[in-house]
Amino acid sequence: MGKFKNIWNHSKDGNNKEERSFLRTVIIASSIFLVFICIIKRDNVFRWIAAGVTIHKQEKMIEFYQQDNERLENELKTLTTDKDSLEKFAREKFLFAEPGEDVYIEE
């Protein structure tokens, strides 16, 4: 870090005037390039990060919906194979009742 501390001080150039001038030019050009790559360019780092966050959220949504599909498929399989479960489902979800039965709804 000691070599780069006084890189901008022209009075300390001495015999290395050309080398230090080249080094300053390289630093400035690199800085401009980094600014161009990170901020100005259309496909920049900030968009990469935002895209990564979006992809992560979408992967979580895909996982949630896959689990929900599995649950619904199991429920459908149960309803189509077992008459008692179908009757229970109809009574709970749609408040079906046989004639003469009383239906009580709790909230």
Image (cartoon, helix red, strand yellow):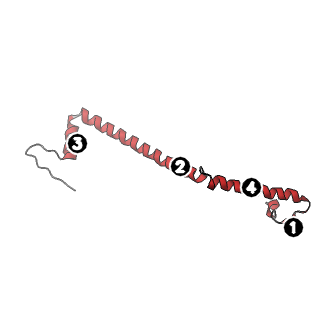
- Secondary-structure class at tag 2: helix
Q: CA distance from mark 2 to mark 4?
A: 29 Å
- Secondary-structure class at tag 3: helix
| Quarter-of-image position of residue 7 | bottom right
| Quarter-of-image position of residue 46 | bottom right
Q: How many residues crowd mark 2 within 10 Å: few (<14), some (14–19), many (20+)?
A: few
Q: Amino acid at mark 3?
A: Phe
Select label 4 or label 1 by which is in front.
4
Relative to 63, say whether 31 is above or below.
below
> 67 or 85: nearer the eye?
67
- Chain-order first, disc 3 or disc 4: 4
Q: Residue at horizontal 87%, vertical 65%?
A: 12
- Chain-order first, disc 2 or disc 3: 2
The residue indicated by pointer 2 is: 51
Q: CA distance from mark 2 to mark 3?
A: 42 Å
- Secondary-structure class at tag 4: helix
The residue indicated by pointer 3 is: 89
The residue indicated by pointer 4 is: 29
Q: Which mark is residue 11?
A: 1
Q: Amino acid at mark 4?
A: Ala
Q: How many residues crowd mark 3 within 10 Å: few (<14), some (14–19), many (20+)?
A: some
> 14 or 57: nearer the eye?
14
Q: CA distance from mark 3 to mark 4?
A: 71 Å
Q: How many marks?
A: 4
- Chain-order first, disc 2 or disc 4: 4
Relative to 98, say whether 27 is above or below.
below
Select label 3 or label 4 by which is in front.
4
Q: How many residues crowd mark 4 within 10 Å: few (<14), some (14–19), many (20+)?
A: few
Mark 2 touches mark 3? (CB < 8 Å): no
- Secondary-structure class at tag 1: helix
Q: Residue furthest top?
A: 81
Estimate the x, y position of residue 27 in percent, counting from the top left. Answer: 76, 57
